[in-house]
């Protein structure tokens, strides 16, 4: 059962909208979204009904952004690993800076930012401190926590840092969601799927990198992280177990081996099963792999909804 939509959302680096769907199911409504990937924008438009501005955020007139209760996004952090701990304004981090600018312009009651766990150790842990300080300087109380999607009704081990900022004049607190009592298995998520149709599974292309580690989880386990690169998508649980030959060298077991289909990968990421994705097969896998799992977003959104409610 979903909540009646009450709070408005502006979404940056929205992709296909995994985070946005999760929030929309928990009392939020995405009214404006931005991404530079054309197919992801078309996917988002198909389900959201939001104004989706496709193109680089650098070219968006920030004065045209609507006011909203919440800003969502997952800013890239490639430059942080090379920049010094006090160089958050490094040119390689321009997209992060636009996230900050949007927060300053929209002045949402709260924001939620998602990132890879490596951001916690960049610059010896100094980068995350600088980021928090910058948001604090813009008027937000910020906290962060490393969450595993598998603890929140997602059949996938996927660790992500979830940063939550509450505007300092909004008198409330925020608590991260508690882990679910039981984990969802691949059997529960995929057991009812029929064999994939032609064109739903990327064939071949098993690189030395792919064969450098085990790529298969069983029916009673959770999937490895669904990647954005189609050729790196892991194996279906019906595949035979992989066999370790040497350090960083594995081979397929005897029998039929195949990747997850895009539909199965989407189910692992907890997208709705009737979700339509625009683009070709490689693009669809990319959109799915880049997304925040819907159910992880729902868990965070549920707590934020309660948090904002306490401030009213």
Image: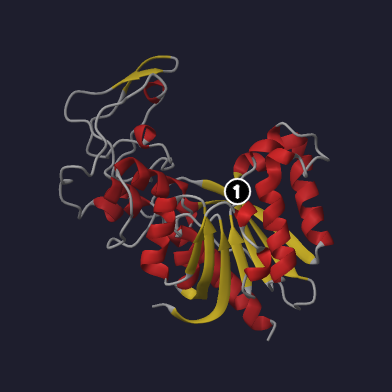
| Residue 199 position in % (x across, y down) | 20, 42
| Residue 281 position in % (x across, y down) | 30, 43
| Residue 269 position in % (x across, y down) | 39, 53
Q: Residue furthest bottom?
A: 312
Q: Quadrant of residue 309?
A: bottom right
- The residue indicated by pointer 1 is 115
Q: In which quarter of the image is the C terminus?
A: bottom right
Relative to 157, is 115 on the left or the right?
right
Q: Could one spot residue 262 in this view of the protein?
A: yes
User: Image height check: is 136 above or below 195?
Assistant: below
Q: Which residue lies furthest to the top in this view?
A: 246
Viewer-proximal residue, 40 or 74?
40
| Residue 56 position in % (x across, y down) | 57, 51
Q: Could one spot residue 121 in this view of the protein?
A: no
Q: Could you tell me which residue is drawn at 67 percent across and 64 percent down?
A: 62
Q: Could you tell me which residue is drawn at 49 percent across and 64 percent down?
A: 52
The image's colour scheme reads: secondary structure
User: Image height check: is 159 above or below 188?
Assistant: above
Viewer-proximal residue, 99 or 233?
99
């Amino acid at each position: 059962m979903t909540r009646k939509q009450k709070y408005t959302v502006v979404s940056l680096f929205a992709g296909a909208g995994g985070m946005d769907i999760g929030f929309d199911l928990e009392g939020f409504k995405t009214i404006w979204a931005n991404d530079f990937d054309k197919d992801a924008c078309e996917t988002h438009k198909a389900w959201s009904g939001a104004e989706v501005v496709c193109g680089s955020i650098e070219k968006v007139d920030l004065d045209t952004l609507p006011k909203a209760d919440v800003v969502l996004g997952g800013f890239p952090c490639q430059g942080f690993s090379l920049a010094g701990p006090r160089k958050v304004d490094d040119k390689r981090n321009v997209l992060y800076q636009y996230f900050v600018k949007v927060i300053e312009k929209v002045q949402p009651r709260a924001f939620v930012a998602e990132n890879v766990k490596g951001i916690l150790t960049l610059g010896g842990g100094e980068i995350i401190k600088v980021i928090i300080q910058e948001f604090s300087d813009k008027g937000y109380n910020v906290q962060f926590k490393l969450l595993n999607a598998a603890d929140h009704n997602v059949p996938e081990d996927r660790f992500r840092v979830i940063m939550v900022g509450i505007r300092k004049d909004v008198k409330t607190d925020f608590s991260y969601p508690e882990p679910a009592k039981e984990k969802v298995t691949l059997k529960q998520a995929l057991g009812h799927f029929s064999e994939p149709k032609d064109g739903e599974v990327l064939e071949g292309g098993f690189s030395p990198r792919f064969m450098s580690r085990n790529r298969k989880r069983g029916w009673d386990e959770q999937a490895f992280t669904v990647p954005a690169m189609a050729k790196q998508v892991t194996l279906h649980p019906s595949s035979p177990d992989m066999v370790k030959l040497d350090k960083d060298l594995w081979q397929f077991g005897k029998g039929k081996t195949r990747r997850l289909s895009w539909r199965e990968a989407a189910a692992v990421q907890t997208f709705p099963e009737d979700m339509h994705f625009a683009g070709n097969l490689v693009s669809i896998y990319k959109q799915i792999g880049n997304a925040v799992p819907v159910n992880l977003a729902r868990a965070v959104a549920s707590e934020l909804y309660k948090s904002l409610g306490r401030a009213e």
